[in-house]
Amino acid sequence: MKKVSVNGYTGLLAGLMFCLTSCLLALPVSAQTFPSRTVRVIVPYGPGTGVDVIARIVTEAMSKNLGVPFVVEQKVGAAGTIAAAHVASAPADGYTLLFDSSAHTSVPSMMLSMPFDTARDFTGVTTLVENPLVLITSQVKGYKSVAELVAAAKAKPGSFNFASGGLATSTHISGEKLRISAAFEAVHVPFKSTTDALAELMGGRIDYTYTALTTALGGIRDGRLVALAMSARRSKVLPNVPTIAEAGYPGAAYSSWVGMMVAGKTPRDIVNRLHQETLKALASPDVQERLAKIGAEPATLTPEEFDVLRRRELVENDRLLKLAGIKPQ
């Protein structure tokens, strides 16, 4: 065996120490210099929807703080899985963000096959806001309360319907929870987006829907839409509209969130940097004012807490959809 001199050992040790030090120094540097180029913001829903509006408000502030562009891209369709699949397959470097709603944890129960593993292929950065959903109907229907809506549904079983922004979205889950809680039959009519659903609702072809307050507020204010109840809590924007529990159906209560995620193997220091910068953006008075105008209240979780929430909701939503008799497609 070849012998190595003491000087050789010393040189080898010095080399190893240099490598180790360089590697350790490289870890925080990646987060300190991130981001250094354009960040893509992937949204599964169309322009003007709740998630889209919130994503733009938050990332505009992040772009200003960090000095790099945050570019919003809509990838609509397949109940949000097109957008999610794009992020899951993107490089795990933090430069491709997914802004999604609670539908992220219900859609897997509706699909016979998924192009990704929801629990494994994403890492949560943070929830951004609690996104209040509002139960609405068209003014042409004449319903003034949840009680009147339920009475009408029970009076004509089989001919009542409700719309959503897609299978297993938060708008679908909310509609099913009301139907089950109030014990009436209604046909679910899924649309490509909540914008399309609202158009049909205002035309009188749909009896009711839930949607983000952000999306419906304009129609409520101009009288084309009637707000019957809030899904989980009263809104400061519509203080006289009761919660669905206050309207007599506590079993129909549902809380929806909007959150930021990245590809599952994104380095933890990058995830933490994104988390910190998102909190900084949400703390901005301008961001808080803009969110308040659309009825969205900041509600944040740590990356670890968000991942726990996502995994728990995957189980809970699967149970609810089976109770509703909905089979994967």
Image (tube, grey):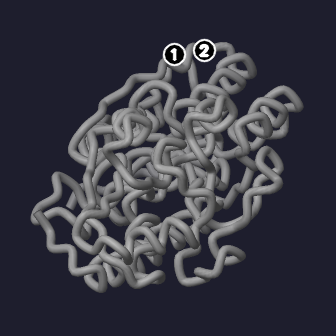
Under tag 2, what secondary structure? loop
| Position of residue 324 in the picture relative to residue 256 (left or right) | left
The three-letter amino acid code for the residue at tag 1 is: Arg
> Which residue shows up at 75% across the image and 49% down it?
297
| Position of residue 220 in the picture relative to residue 73 (left or right) | right
Identify residue for label 1.
37
Give the answer, above or below, for where 83 lies relative to 48.
Answer: below
Q: Which mark is residue 68?
A: 2
Under tag 1, what secondary structure? loop
| Quadrant of the image containing the C terminus | bottom left
> Which residue shows up at 39% across the image and 33% down it?
199
Q: Earlier in the sequence, mark 2 or mark 1?
A: 1
Is residue 69 at least partly visible in the picture?
A: yes
> Which residue shows up at 71% across the image and 76% down it?
246
Give the answer, above or below, for where 308 lies relative to 237.
Answer: below
| Position of residue 80 in the picture relative to residue 178 (left or right) | left
- Give how far across and how far down residue 239 sits, in percent: 82, 53
> Which residue shows up at 73% across the image and 44% down it?
295
Q: Which mark is residue 297?
A: none
- Give how far across and how far down residue 22 sits, in percent: 56, 38
Is residue 15 at least partly visible in the picture?
A: no
Q: Which picture quadrant has residue 43?
A: top left
Is the C-beta separation of discs 2 and 1 under 8 Å? yes
